[in-house]
């Protein structure tokens, strides 16, 4: 089994395991869910994780985060990596205070620095452009059904397409959306008990 196939088998196994833990009674259609909650709790945090495994060997991971844990409230960050087929990692990161980043009117489009996550249309779109880091990408994930619990939403593996630089790419992608009113360490401790 090649490393690429092994990664995909592992991804599918994890997603099946995750899907098995999601109560079937909670399911939102493709036109609902994924919107920012923007809790006013002092320790509130939410984030969207996008992962794409591309047939050409590249991997893209990105996290868009909004937190009240400081500095200030509704501080946002976009961080991630483009891992090229040869293993070279190109990191990106931007952080912005409350009024220096943009959230779309429907809560489904985040623009933080030079990274954009648009969850409002028929395709979920991640765009990152950084001349400084040598990154120019657009990844589109085919929208699928959103499932989850009161703490998170997940869109199981879905076809991905797009471009990195001037090269067209295809592959598989996934998206999760997690939110909490308490510090994440407290939530993890509670789940561990």
Image (spheres, rainbow, N blue to C red):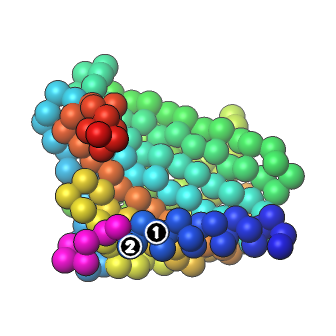
Task: Identify which residue is drawn at 27% across, 47% down.
Answer: 179
Secondary structure at badge 2 equals helix
Give the label on residue 20, or none: 2
Q: Residues within 10 Å of mark 2 (few under 14, many from 20)?
A: few
Q: Quadrant of the N terminus?
A: bottom right
Left/right placement of residue 106 relative to residue 145 reads left
Q: Quadrant of the C terminus?
A: top left
* Residue 25 percent across, percent down from the top left: 19, 77
Label 1: which residue? 17
Residue 141 seen by the camera = no
Residue 11 seen by the camera = yes
Q: Residues within 10 Å of mark 1 (few under 14, many from 20)?
A: few
Task: Give the residues in magenta.
Answer: 21-27
Task: Identify which residue is drawn at 70% across, 65% down.
Answer: 7
Prevalent SS, magenta region: loop
Task: Identify which residue is drawn at 40% across, 72% down.
Answer: 19
Which residue is most to the top? Answer: 71
On screen, residue 144 above or below 174: below
* Residue 90 percent across, percent down from the top left: 71, 41
* Residue 119 percent across, percent down from the top left: 37, 64
Q: Are marks 2 and 1 in contact (CB under 8 Å)?
A: yes
Task: Identify which residue is drawn at 60% across, 38% down.
Answer: 92
Please check the rendered image and state whether residue 22 is part of the magenta-colored stretch, yes or no.
Answer: yes
């Amino acid at each position: 089994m090649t490393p690429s196939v092994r990664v995909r088998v592992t991804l599918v196994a994890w997603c099946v395991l995750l899907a098995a833990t999601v109560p079937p009674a909670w399911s939102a259609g493709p036109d609902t869910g994924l919107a920012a909650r923007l809790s006013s709790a002092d320790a509130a945090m939410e984030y969207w994780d996008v992962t794409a495994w591309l047939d050409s060997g590249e991997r893209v991971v990105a996290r868009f985060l909004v937190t009240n844990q400081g500095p200030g409230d509704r501080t946002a960050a976009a961080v991630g990596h483009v891992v090229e087929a040869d293993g070279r990692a190109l990191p990106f990161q931007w952080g912005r205070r409350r009024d220096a980043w943009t959230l779309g009117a429907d809560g489904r489009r985040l623009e933080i620095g030079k990274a954009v996550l648009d969850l409002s249309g028929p395709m979920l779109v991640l765009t990152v452009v950084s001349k400084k880091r040598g990154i120019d990408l657009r990844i589109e994930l085919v929208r699928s059904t959103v499932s989850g619990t009161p703490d998170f939403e997940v869109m199981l593996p879905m076809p991905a397409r797009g471009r990195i630089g001037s090269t067209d790419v295809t592959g598989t992608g996934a998206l999760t959306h997690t939110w909490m009113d308490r510090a994440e360490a407290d939530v993890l401790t509670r789940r561990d008990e």
